[in-house]
């Protein structure tokens, strides 16, 4: 009797299930018998369906005794509502991809999901990922995809030309900006034509806030921390100082995200505070320049507090309504997502912009330099999750407020106060105590 080519990770329940499933199919691997059927749900946007199809095909090569049917649905708010409805009515697929962090908490994982903390792969997760798929009662998700970070994409040739070193403190960063400006180059690229990009001075600084106050997110959610107070106020101050230093490109008010990526890739500008996910677009649109772009975190005031702020990947989950043989088959599929072949499939359709969230997966050797740079910060334990993964509170007007601060319309203190006011309504709508 064959158990096919499955890589056994020890005497787990999943391993035993693999043997049992093959035995029930009536013979060895490759005989074509299939007696367990499960479903997989992915989002329709991006490469979700293509990844799902490739995953199922590869999974069936190792597990022909399991039939997986692929379903898809929209992402965003519509998708969130569909997930909640399916979980409430017991109609959720056997394995589904979904968000991590605060959005996961909103679907009541303790009640609706199967705990997976006892699976062998759970011990391989990187530290920042564990809390965003967990509650006090258990761990519920396996990573799907790679991380990215909010920080600085920078032009390596400019640094080499001017003899600059990667900064680890805010003073060092500003000193570099002065040197770049004196050389007649754009020091900091801003692209407020796409207003969301203006938020990175604030959102990308949160890893540094956590380094100084590890309870900040919890206390913020409870209404006990504010952006008008340090250390969070510093992110608004930094954006104001960057504007007042006259470091921005002349067209910062109208430039777009794609303009920013072009500028940092081709050397039209030195620093672009943005998500590292931009390297995927650079690889596509400026392939000859992808090696000219590096990454470093937004520096804290004190170098000892500088951390990469990580946007963690989505995850795959199993609803509590999946039981019996279907549950064991679903666990095998979840495990396969982070097997060597599953890891390859996760980056086959997208250029990875950051590290995997499990040590079972390794980045390809030809990933962009910026991705390699970010991997170093994660490997050194110098990375913290972005605020949205550890608190449900994010006001809708932050991008407009940071445009104001980054354009000299509002001071840092005024912007922080506006944002503290902006989040009150949302916190109240969520029914959070202390608001």
Image (cartoon, helix red, strand yellow):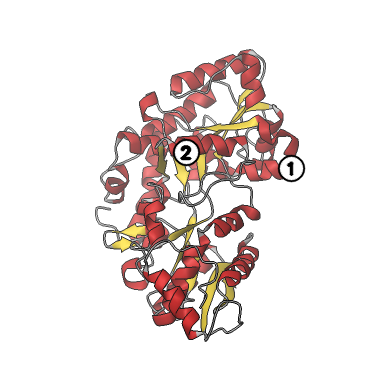
User: Residue at label 2?
Assistant: 204
First in sequence, mark 2 or 1: give its number: 2
* Residue at x 52% of width, y 82% of height: 37
> In the figure, 305 relative to 379: above or below?
above
Q: Position of residue 334 (x, y in %)?
A: 47, 66
Q: Secondary structure at mark 1?
A: helix
Q: Which mark is residue 285?
A: 1
Above or below residue 27? Residue 257 is above
Res 421 seen here: yes
Residue closer to the observer: 107 or 78: 107
Local packing at callout 1 (Cα closer than 10 Å; few below 14, some 14-19, many 20+) is some
Work out whether residue 60 or residue 223 is closer to the camera in this orientation and state it.
60
Q: State the mark number for residue 196.
A: none
| Number of numbered discs on residues | 2
x and y, in percent, of residue 29 in the image: 57, 76
Q: Residue at x 67, y 33 (%)?
A: 291
Residue 86 visible? The answer is no
Q: Residue placed at 39% from the left, 24% from the top?
A: 303
- Quadrant in the rendering for residue 392: bottom left
Give the crowd class for mark 2: few <14, some 14-19, many >=20 residues within 10 Å.
many
Relative to the observer, which residue lies in front, 320 or 435?
Answer: 320
């Amino acid at each position: 009797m064959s158990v096919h080519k499955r890589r056994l990770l020890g005497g787990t329940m999943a391993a035993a299930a693999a043997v049992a499933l093959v035995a029930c199919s009536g013979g060895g691997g490759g005989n074509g018998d299939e007696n367990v059927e499960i479903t997989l749900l992915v989002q329709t946007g991006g490469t979700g369906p293509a990844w799902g199809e490739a995953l199922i095909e590869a999974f069936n090569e190792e597990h022909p005794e399991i039939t997986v049917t692929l379903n898809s649905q929209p992402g965003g708010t519509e998708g969130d509502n569909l997930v909640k409805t399916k979980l409430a009515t017991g109609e959720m697929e056997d394995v589904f991809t979904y968000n991590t962090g605060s959005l996961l908490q909103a679907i009541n994982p303790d009640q609706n999901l199967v705990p997976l903390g006892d699976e062998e792969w759970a011990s391989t997760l990187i530290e920042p990922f564990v809390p965003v798929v967990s509650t006090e009662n258990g761990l519920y998700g396996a990573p799907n995809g790679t991380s990215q970070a909010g920080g600085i994409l920078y032009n390596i040739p400019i640094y080499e030309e001017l003899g600059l070193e990667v900064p680890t403190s805010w003073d060092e960063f500003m000193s570099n900006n002065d040197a770049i400006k004196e050389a007649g180059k754009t020091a900091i690229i801003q692209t407020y034509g796409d207003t969301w990009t203006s938020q990175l001075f604030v959102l990308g600084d949160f890893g540094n806030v956590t380094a100084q106050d590890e309870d900040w997110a919890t206390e913020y959610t409870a209404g006990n921390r504010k952006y008008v107070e340090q250390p969070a106020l510093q992110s608004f101050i930094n954006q104001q100082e960057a504007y007042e230093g006259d470091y921005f490109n002349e067209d910062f008010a109208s430039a777009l995200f794609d303009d920013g990526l072009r500028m940092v890739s081709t050397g039209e500008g030195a620093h672009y505070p943005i998500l590292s996910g931009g390297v995927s677009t650079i690889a596509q649109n400026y392939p000859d320049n992808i090696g000219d772009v590096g990454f470093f975190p937004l520096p804290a005031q004190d170098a000892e507090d500088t951390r990469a702020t990580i946007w963690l990947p989505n995850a795959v989950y199993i609803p509590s309504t999946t039981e019996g043989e279907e549950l064991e088959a679903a666990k095998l599929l979840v495990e396969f997502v982070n097997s060597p072949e599953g890891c390859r499939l996760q980056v086959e359709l997208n250029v990875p912009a950051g590290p995997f969230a499990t040590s079972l997966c390794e980045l390809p050797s030809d990933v962009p330099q910026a991705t390699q740079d970010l991997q170093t910060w994660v490997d050194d334990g110098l990375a913290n999750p972005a605020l949205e993964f550890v608190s449900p509170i994010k006001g809708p007007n932050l991008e407009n407020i940071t445009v104001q601060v980054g354009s000299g319309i509002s001071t840092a203190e005024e912007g922080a106060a506006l944002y503290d006011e902006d989040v009150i309504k949302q916190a109240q709508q969520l029914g959070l105590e202390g608001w």
